[in-house]
């Protein structure tokens, strides 16, 4: 056995190819074992201890010590001692490591589960640093509550890396670096950096900090009032029902904030400018507010229930489009005070969608809907893209601008119940405010149509029918599609009628 004992200075002790006992003494020592099973004791000072190959026993002693495991080393016993101590694990530089860290009573058990497996038995250590190296690395962090661990840091380096801290109750720092990485936080305050490529970052149940950095990243704050930064690239910043009041900054690129409301319950949302920032909030159910900077698009999903969204003037912000999907339920959109373009789909239910001064697209979906385009060149679709809108009566009102009233697509004509024996008075669209000089109507190219007088009580104007028998004359068996209110005549061959 080789024995080396340092003095009071900053000593360097290196073991040999024998069973070594290396004792640092005072000072900030560097102690490195040899090829066999060694015992390393740091003593006083802030020491660096490296076991090297063999199953070593390593004791930091007094001071803030760092205990290092390098790829190829053995299964070591590590005791930090007094002070703020760190264990650093450096994985394979070429292959993907599969690591797991968990409590073993009040001690820590750290394992590599693939390649050449090993186990570290650790105690009295506050920080745990894991460097994955090359390859697709994985670190799973379990509940470490009963241990001394306060912070676990994971750096993935190259490859598509995974940090799974969903069960963790120690703070996490995750660095994806290169590759398409997935970093998932846990129960305490976490900080996650995505790195260079297209990463998925998800916080946990506390106040987390997420930074996408480069690439087109997806960032989900989860519970707690989080800080979320997209960085470079076209990033997606997500709020899900039950999350906290987050700060979100898209930064460079074309960034989107996605809000997913309560499933089955009606959300009351509002979106407005707050200086150059955007304030998005829910005014019922579980209250929250998002403070948003440098984001170009908002996507709001009601997720069922009677949802509402009010959009105010956003001219002072970076928002270029707002999308609203009401889902099932009787939904309400009021964007009458904004110049920002709106894309809205009411989904199933009797919806009211009111656009603003921008060029809006309003889709009623299934149900009896009221669509009001407002100023701007709007697209109004009363039915669903693939639903013929049977049994519903929709009102489409374009208002100012050159508006498009969509009554069909390439496959079907909306409001066609398929019954050639009746006029179809239970399903049609009322085209309020249609102007032949500015607006257009879209019909199906494979269907023949005719015009006639409005058959609807209280709605005068010209009606468009499907010419069921192809005789070119409106008769009792023709299917009503729409009524252009207060329009005395329509020419289906005019330039304001297009066919798809």
Image (cartoon, rainbow, N blue to C red):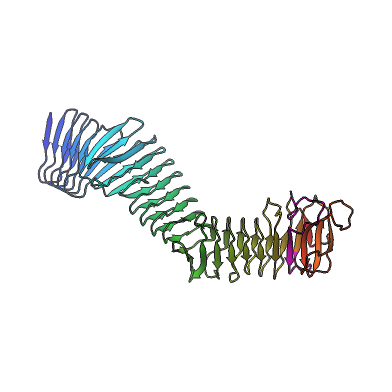
Q: Residue at x 29, y 38 (%)?
A: 110
Where 37 falls versus 156 (above or below)? above
Is residue 293 part of the magenta span, yes or no? no
228 vs 146, nearest the viewer: 146
Q: Where the N terminus falls, by quadrant?
A: top left
Task: For residue 157, say whether it is visible.
Answer: no
Viewer-closest of 444 and 37: 444
Q: Give the extent of the magenta segment.
A: 410-439
Q: Residue 32: x and y, percent?
A: 20, 37
Number of numbered discs overlaid on the protein picture: 0
**Residue 26 screen position, x and y as percent:** 11, 46
Could you tell me if residue 355 is visible in this image?
yes
- Please name the residue shown 27% across and 42% down the image: 88
Does the magenta segment cover residue 412? yes
> Eyeballing the image, is 317 above or below 164?
below
Taking depth in this image into account, of 256 and 135 the one nearest to the observer is 256
Q: What secondary structure prevails in the magenta region?
A: loop
Left or right position of 440 against 468: left
Estimate the x, y position of residue 449 in percent, counting from the top left.
83, 56
Q: Nearer the viewer, residue 300 or 218?
A: 300
Residue 71: image location, x then y, percent: 31, 35
- Left or right, residue 482 beside residue 89: right
Q: Which quadrant of the view contains residue 117?
A: top left
**Residue displayed at 66% across by 64% down:** 371
């Amino acid at each position: 056995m080789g024995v080396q004992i340092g003095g009071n200075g900053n000593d360097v002790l290196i073991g040999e190819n024998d069973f070594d006992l290396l004792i640092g003494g005072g000072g900030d020592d560097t102690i490195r074992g040899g090829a066999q099973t060694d015992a390393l004791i740091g003593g006083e000072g802030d020491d660096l201890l490296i076991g090297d190959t063999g199953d070593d026993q390593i004791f930091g002693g007094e001071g803030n010590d760092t205990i290092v495991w390098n790829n190829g080393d053995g299964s070591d016993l590590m005791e930090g001692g007094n002070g703020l101590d760190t264990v650093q694990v450096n994985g394979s530089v070429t292959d993907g490591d599969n690591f797991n860290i968990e409590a073993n009573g009040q001690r820590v058990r750290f394992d590599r589960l693939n390649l050449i497996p090993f186990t570290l038995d650790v105690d009295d250590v506050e920080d745990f640093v894991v460097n994955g190296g090359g390859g697709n690395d994985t670190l799973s962090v379990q509940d470490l509550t009963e241990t001394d661990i306060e912070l676990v840091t994971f750096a993935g380096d190259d490859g598509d890396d995974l940090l799974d801290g969903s069960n963790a109750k120690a703070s996490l720092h995750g660095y994806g670096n290169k590759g398409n990485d997935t970093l998932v936080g846990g129960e305490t305050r976490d900080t996650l950096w995505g790195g260079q490529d297209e990463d998925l970052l998800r916080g946990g149940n506390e106040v987390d900090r997420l930074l996408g950095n480069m690439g087109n990243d997806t960032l989900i704050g989860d519970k707690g009032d989080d800080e979320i930064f997209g960085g470079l690239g076209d990033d997606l910043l997500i709020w899900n029902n039950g999350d906290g009041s987050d700060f979100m900054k898209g930064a460079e690129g074309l960034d989107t904030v996605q809000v997913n409301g309560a499933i089955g319950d009606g959300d009351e949302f509002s979106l407005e400018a707050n200086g150059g920032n955007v304030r998005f909030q829910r005014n019922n159910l579980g209250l929250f507010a998002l403070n948003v900077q440098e984001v170009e698009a908002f996507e709001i999903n009601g997720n069922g229930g009677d949802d509402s969204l009010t959009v105010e003037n956003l001219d002072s912000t970076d928002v270029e489009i707002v999308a609203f999907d009401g889902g099932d339920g009787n939904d309400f959109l009021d964007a009458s005070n904004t110049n920002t373009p709106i894309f809205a789909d009411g989904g199933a239910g009797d919806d009211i969608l009111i656009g603003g001064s921008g060029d809006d697209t309003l889709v009623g979906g299934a149900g009896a809907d009221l669509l009001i385009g407002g100023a701007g060149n709007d697209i109004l679709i009363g039915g669903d893209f693939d639903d013929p809108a049977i049994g519903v009566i929709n009102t489409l009102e374009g208002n100012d601008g050159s508006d498009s009233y969509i009554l069909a697509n390439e496959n079907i004509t909306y409001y066609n119940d398929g019954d050639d024996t009746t006029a179809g008075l239970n399903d049609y669209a009322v085209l309020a405010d249609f102007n032949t000089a500015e607006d257009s109507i879209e019909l199906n190219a494979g269907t023949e149509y005719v015009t006639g007088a409005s058959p609807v009580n209280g709605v005068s104007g010209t009606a468009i029918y499907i010419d069921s028998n192809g005789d070119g004359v409106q008769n009792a068996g023709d299917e009503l599609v729409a009524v252009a209110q207060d329009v005395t005549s329509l020419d289906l061959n005019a330039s304001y009628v297009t066919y798809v």
